[in-house]
Image: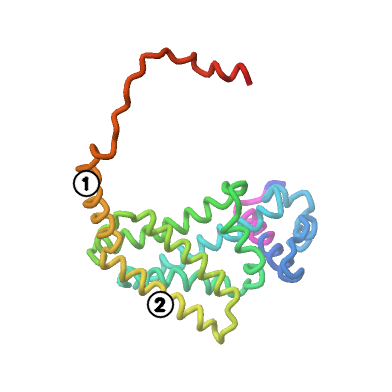
Amino acid sequence: MKISQTQKAENRQGIIRAAVDLIIEKGGKLASMREVARRAGIGDATIYNYFPTKEAILYAYYEDHVQDCLTQIKFLESFPTFSVQEQLQTLFDVSLNLYLADREFVEASFKDVWLGNSRDWGRIKPIRTNFLAAIQDIIAAAEEVGEIPEQVFRELMGQFFMDAYIATVMYWLSDTSEHFQNTMVLVDRGLDLACSLMKAGIANKVFDLAVFLFKNHVLNRLDRFVTPLKKTEKVKRKFMEAMKDE
């Protein structure tokens, strides 16, 4: 029987929710697809119409998480009036608040998903790409209004904040302070320092200095260090001929 798109979306969410709850109940261990299907109230075979493996359900959780973060921020009417530091901090805070109800699940799966190996890159890429795009947009918006100078290494700067986010979540997962105060202090001070460096254009100045030194102390003296190659009169062997002897 054909089902509506709404029902499909509800089934998908039900599967993800069932997997999360089971992993929490099992102390971080992955449940079988059959267990997840039965908890979600769908057939054992039907679950494969939504996810090919139980690992795929984990990645879907984080894909949805990133999308939920961005949706919440888009509905913040005052967000465009925030400073670049406040916008980045809001992004971090919204993510942590959404994780809070599933903290045990996040503790069991976050590192594997966000820091997975190259074999899983196809699954990790959409998650990281969407989150990185949000960070890049925040930096670009700050450049447009002159809050920070145009960043020569904007992509690297965005990656830096991405790595800072991952480190923040991992720190938060081990934070035992009341109301996670230590994490809040870490985020506040870390972003304050990073954004101050962006505003001061430190990366740009370092780049300009490197270019200056290269032009004046390397290129102008290159002839002192480079010995021209002498043309040989000998005929070389045929290309890859030596391979025949191996």
Residue 206 horizontal/vertical position (percent): 28, 59
Label 1 CA crowd tier, 10 Å (few <14, some 14–19, many 20+):
few
Task: Please name the amino acid that badge 2 sits on.
Answer: Arg
Residue 222 appears left or right of 138 = left
Q: Which mark is residue 30?
A: none
- The answer to whether 3 appears left or right of 218 in the picture is right
The residue where tag 1 is placed is 215
Between 114 and 194, the one nearer to me in the picture: 194
The residue under the point 50% across, 60% down is 67
In this view of the protein, which residue sits in the foreground, 235 or 2?
A: 235
What is the crowding at mark 2: few (fewer than 14 residues within 10 Å), some, or many (at least 20)? few
The residue at which mark 2 appears reads as 189
Magenta-highlighted stretch: main secondary structure? Answer: helix
In magenta, the rendered stretch is: 3-15
Give the colour scheme shown.
Answer: rainbow
Residue 8 part of the magenta segment: yes
Secondary element at tag 2: helix
